[in-house]
Image (cartoon, rainbow, N blue to C red):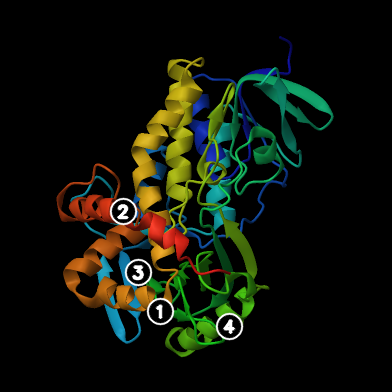
């Protein structure tokens, strides 16, 4: 097999790829990780970690002392403000965090290297496909072979095209933009989300604006929107961010932006997430919650899952991975995508948001959805609401798609 063979190759050194590498290398798997960027690169992101993400980082034994602890979420809809603690007594911790990606990603990939993974920076890796099976990658003019190739390269690009793992054309996706600014409230213990966003024409935007205090003198300010809104193609993210910034400037005593705002795309579906010799994890598998644009927790979980299944049986790992990811996430993500068609209708969005924070009970459910704390086996009232919503939206789905706002 030679020096260029490893058990597992991971394309992408973000949270999902690093989690797969850590989990596999710690169990004796020979892992190589390739990333196009240099070590210490910044990834544009909201930097917020849900309690679910904190649980995954704890499982990976990542030291989180460098992260800023968050105890709850402040939701704002028009004049209604609700401050809710992250729920305790669930299978997740009762706190989240804000951890700028430059530092989070470095901590994760350092742990992968410490576990024995070989990390190759500034090198693009593309799958090598032989008779329909992925047998390795071409990278830096050399061929590397592996028993499993893990696509962890974020929003779909060249790798996804080669594997047939691009996003599903008619499914929604999101766009988001963020900047950093100094604020005396940088050490606040609450994330803030404004659910009532309007564009320059006064149109309601299905999405939200956020203030994520980083605890280091700065806050991450940003906003995101779903592709199901009318006029989405003409939506100017920079002006949306400016409008939102104006609304929070005084209450957060914001300084000027510390860098130019940067935008990114949030994939929310994938045509395939496994095949012969490969799996896709995290954003590359479309594992992003359409209701909050969050995917770090799913990235970490899917990475660990892919590694564990590979250790159990390399031959069946791709198929079993697809099934287990499906059991864990598909119903919730499908409901989220259907929900995004629903709130693409401005009048539904307006009345829905009044409802979402209108009563304490429903606000608590909104909190669990925003915190990625609900999945198909969630007990109690949130689980019941989730399952009934899934059924109702399933019936409404064809109508919602037919009447979707045309961009």
Would you say residue 340 is visible in this rendering?
no
SS at mark 3? loop
SS at mark 1? loop
Residue bearing mark 1: 196
Residue count near mark 4 (Cα–Cα under 10 Å), binned few <14, some 14–19, many ≥20: some
Residue count near mark 1 (Cα–Cα under 10 Å), binned few <14, some 14–19, many ≥20: many
Which sits in the foreground, 246 or 121?
246
- Classify 381 as above or below 324: below
- Classify 343 as above or below 282: below
In this view, the mark in front (2 or 3): 2
Residue count near mark 2 (Cα–Cα under 10 Å), binned few <14, some 14–19, many ≥20: few
Residue bearing mark 3: 189
CA gap between label 3 and label 1 equals 22 Å
Q: Which residue is located at x 45 percent, y 59 percent?
A: 401
Q: Which residue is located at x 29 percent, y 83 percent?
A: 80
Q: Decide which of tag 4 and tag 3 comes sooner along the chain.
A: 3
Please report contact status of discs 4 and 3: CB closer than 8 Å, yes or no.
Answer: no
Residue bearing mark 2: 395
CA gap between label 4 and label 3 equals 24 Å
Name the side, left or right, on which 91 lies relative to 289: left
User: Which label was assigned to residue 206?
Assistant: none
Residue bearing mark 4: 242
Residue 344: x percent and y percent? 45, 69
Q: Decide which of tag 4 and tag 2 comes sooner along the chain.
A: 4
In this view, the mark in front (2 or 1): 2
- Classify 57 as above or below 140: below
């Amino acid at each position: 097999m030679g020096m260029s063979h490893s058990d597992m190759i991971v394309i992408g050194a973000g949270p999902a790829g690093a989690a797969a590498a850590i989990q596999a290398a710690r169990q004796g798997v020979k892992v190589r990780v390739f990333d196009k960027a240099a070590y210490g690169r910044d990834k544009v992101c909201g930097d917020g970690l849900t309690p679910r993400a904190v649980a995954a980082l704890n499982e990976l034994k990542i030291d989180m002392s460098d992260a800023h602890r968050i105890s709850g979420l402040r939701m704002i809809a028009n004049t209604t403000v609700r401050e809710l603690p992250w729920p305790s007594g669930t299978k997740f911790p009762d706190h989240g965090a804000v951890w700028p990606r430059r530092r989070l990603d470095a901590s994760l990939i350092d742990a992968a290297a410490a576990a024995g993974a070989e990390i190759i920076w500034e090198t693009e890796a593309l799958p090598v496909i032989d008779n329909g099976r992925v047998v390795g990658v071409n990278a830096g003019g050399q061929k590397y072979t592996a028993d499993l190739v893990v696509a962890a390269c974020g929003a779909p690009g060249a790798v996804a095209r080669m594997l047939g793992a691009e996003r599903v054309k008619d499914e929604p996706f999101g766009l988001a933009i963020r900047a950093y600014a100094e604020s005396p409230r940088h050490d606040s213990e609450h994330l803030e989300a404004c659910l009532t966003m309007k564009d320059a024409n006064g149109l309601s935007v299905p999405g939200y604006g956020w203030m994520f205090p980083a605890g280091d003198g700065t806050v991450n300010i940003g906003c995101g929107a779903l592709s199901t809104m009318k006029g989405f193609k003409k939506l100017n993210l920079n002006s949306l961010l400016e409008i939102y910034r104006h609304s929070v400037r005084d209450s957060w005593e914001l300084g000027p932006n510390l860098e130019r705002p940067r935008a990114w795309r949030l994939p929310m579906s994938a045509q395939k997430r496994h095949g012969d010799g490969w799996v896709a994890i995290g954003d590359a598998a479309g594992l992003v919650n359409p209701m909050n644009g969050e995917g770090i927790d799913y990235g970490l979980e899917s990475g660990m899952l892919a590694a564990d299944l590979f250790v159990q049986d390399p031959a069946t790992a791709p198929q079993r991975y697809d099934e287990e990811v499906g059991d864990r996430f598909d119903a919730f993500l499908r409901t989220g995508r259907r929900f995004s068609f629903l709130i693409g209708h401005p009048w539904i969005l307006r009345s829905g948001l009044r409802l979402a924070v209108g009563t304490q009970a429903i606000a608590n459910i909104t909190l669990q959805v925003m915190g990625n704390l609900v999945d198909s086996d969630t007990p109690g009232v949130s689980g019941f609401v989730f399952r009934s919503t899934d059924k109702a939206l399933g019936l409404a789905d064809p109508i919602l798609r037919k009447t979707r706002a045309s961009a």
